[in-house]
Image (tube, rainbow, N blue to C red):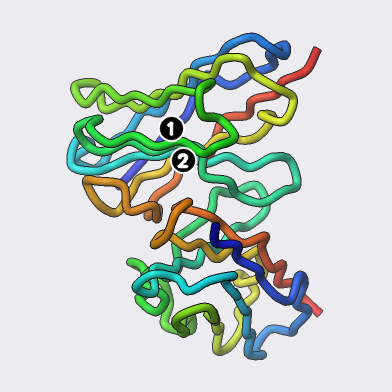
Amino acid sequence: EVQLVESGGGLVQPGRSLRLSCAASGFTFDDYAMHWVRQAPGKGLEWVSGISWNSGSIGYADSVKGRFTISRDNAKNSLYLQMNSLRAEDTALYYCAKDWAAVPRYYFDYWGQGTLVTVSS
Amino acid sequence: EIVLTQSPGTLSLSPGERATLSCRASQSVSSSYLAWYQQKPGQAPRLLIYGASSRATGIPDRFSGSGSGTDFTLTISRLEPEDFAVYYCQQYGSSPRGTFGQGTKLEIK
């Protein structure tokens, strides 16, 4: 059974940093691209960032480019999102999502339950 | 930049009825690279349809997707109580990839 478990969310002040993690199990992690998708409270879905199986292809939404960094550790079956210079508009539930393919195809066949990030003073 | 517009915003139907949800793109979606997701309150989204018309693993055959170019449809042939949820379309063929529509809420009438 595929499982994606996010952690690392919490309350953080504007301008500060936070690092999210996603622990994957139930599939061969290094065979697939992975993504972060977020959902602001009561709002729709927004793709944030994606990374290929070997970290050779990485992409970011314009809204987070230059502030967020995605990475993965295939030996640990883990995905990360380093979030710097956080803003109030980054407040959201952050989902870890598995791609269908090794290089990003940008649709997601499995999702975690999310970790909540709240940016507020 | 492709923008996806879903309609209606809210659809009120009864169990057993047929639901038709629309997703319109501001420009043609490359190779019918369109997906549909279902999201229930407090849950993560679930992939229903990819490639505009292919059902994901384990998805009941009452769910079907159709369309091409700029107009796509998700049809639920006979609504079950568990089908009432929010549905999102997503295009993944053109830049910026991974963009979602704003969602359609399917509620019990």
Q: Nearer the viewer, residue A52 or A41?
A: A52
Q: Is the Cβ of the residue at disc 1 closer than 8 Å to that at disc 2?
A: yes
| Horizontal relation, residue B61 to residue A92: left or right | left
Q: Residue at x 72, y 67 (%)?
A: B105
How far apart, in angstroms, are the residues tagged by discs 1 and 2? 6 Å
Q: Percent from the top left, x then y, of residue A117?
A: 64, 25
Q: Chain of mark 1?
A: A
Labelled disc at residue A73: none
Which quarter of the rendering shows the C terminus of chain B? Answer: bottom right
Q: Nearer the viewer, residue A37 or A57?
A: A57
B33 shown above or below A62: below
Q: Percent from the top left, x then y, of residue B54?
A: 35, 76
Which quarter of the rendering shows the N terminus of chain B? Answer: bottom right
| Horizontal relation, residue A101 to residue B61: left or right | left
**Residue that mark 2 sits on:** A112
Q: Percent from the top left, x then y, of residue B35?
A: 45, 66
Q: Amino acid at mark 1?
A: Val
Local packing at callout 1 (Cα closer than 10 Å; few below 14, some 14-19, many 20+) is some
Residue A114 picture quarter:
top right
Q: Percent from the top left, x then y, of residue A42?
A: 75, 47
Q: Residue at x 64, y 85 (%)?
A: B19
**Residue that mark 1 sits on:** A5
Dot 2 lies on which element? loop
A81 shown above or below B81: above
B106 shown above or below A95: below
Q: Residue at x 39, y 74 (%)?
A: B32
